[in-house]
Amino acid sequence: MNNEGKIYLDEDTHLMVKASKGDRDAYGKLYSKYSFTVISFITRLNGQFQSPEDIVQEVFKRIWEKRKEYHPTASFKTYLFDYVEKVFSEERKRLSRKSILHKRLVRQYCDSQSILFRQLPEAHLNEMTQTIEQGISKLTFKQRQAVELYCFKGISMEEASVQANCSVVAFEGRLRLARRRLKRLLRVH
């Protein structure tokens, strides 16, 4: 008997094969077994994430969405951590873009107030960042979505409008209104 081409499944890979066919119980077992491991891994990689649980949720959401494409060519753990690395990398980029946007808004505010940005104490910058976060939370859902998709995720205007389920013109309008509102909120502080 020829053993070439056979794949020997460990328990986790077997569960993922079952999940790929829609078995939610098998998927739940994988989630239960690995969610804490992924949280620990993300925390060790970079402690700045306030909610590694969000990354875990995104990883397992994507695995479920792509379950039909799963082929057991490696262990499930290898498959899982490929997703972890991708989602983690995307989140780091999003946070970096978010930080850049916050600094840009603070600079615009400071320039409009004739304050030298370099002279602001760190505590004031932190306060301004909190103000921006609060301002973003006061935007309408569609405006927050526009800021999140275009500014934080950094996707193109066209792609962002598709994800927001609107035209490019409507999306640009939402983004413009969000920016105006944020600037007004910053002037109040």
Image (spheres, helix red, strand yellow):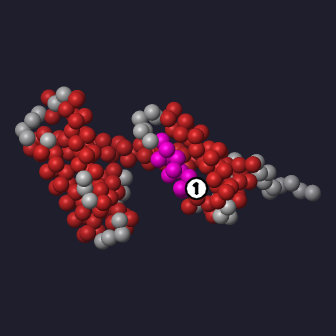
On screen, residue 73 versus residue 122, left or right, reads: right
Q: Main structural element of the magenta stretch: helix, strand or loop? A: helix
| Residue at 45 percent of width and 33 percent of height | 47
How many numbered marks appear?
1
The quarter of the picture where residue 126 lies is top left
On screen, residue 186 versus residue 4, left or right, reads: left
Residue placed furthest toward the bottom: 167
The image shows residue 25, relative to residue 94, as above or below, that is below
Q: Find the magenta span and give its range.
A: 52-63
Label 1: which residue?
63
| Residue at 19 percent of width and 41 percent of height | 106
Q: At which x and y percent is residue 49?
A: 43, 38
Question: Pointer 1: residues within 10 angstroms few (<14), some, or many (20+)?
Answer: many
Quadrant position of the C terminus in the picture: top left
| Residue at 56 percent of width and 61 percent of height | 65
Q: At which x and y percent is residue 35?
A: 58, 44
- Magenta stretch containing residue 108, yes or no? no
- Magenta stretch containing residue 62, yes or no? yes
The image shows residue 185, relative to residue 50, as above or below, that is below
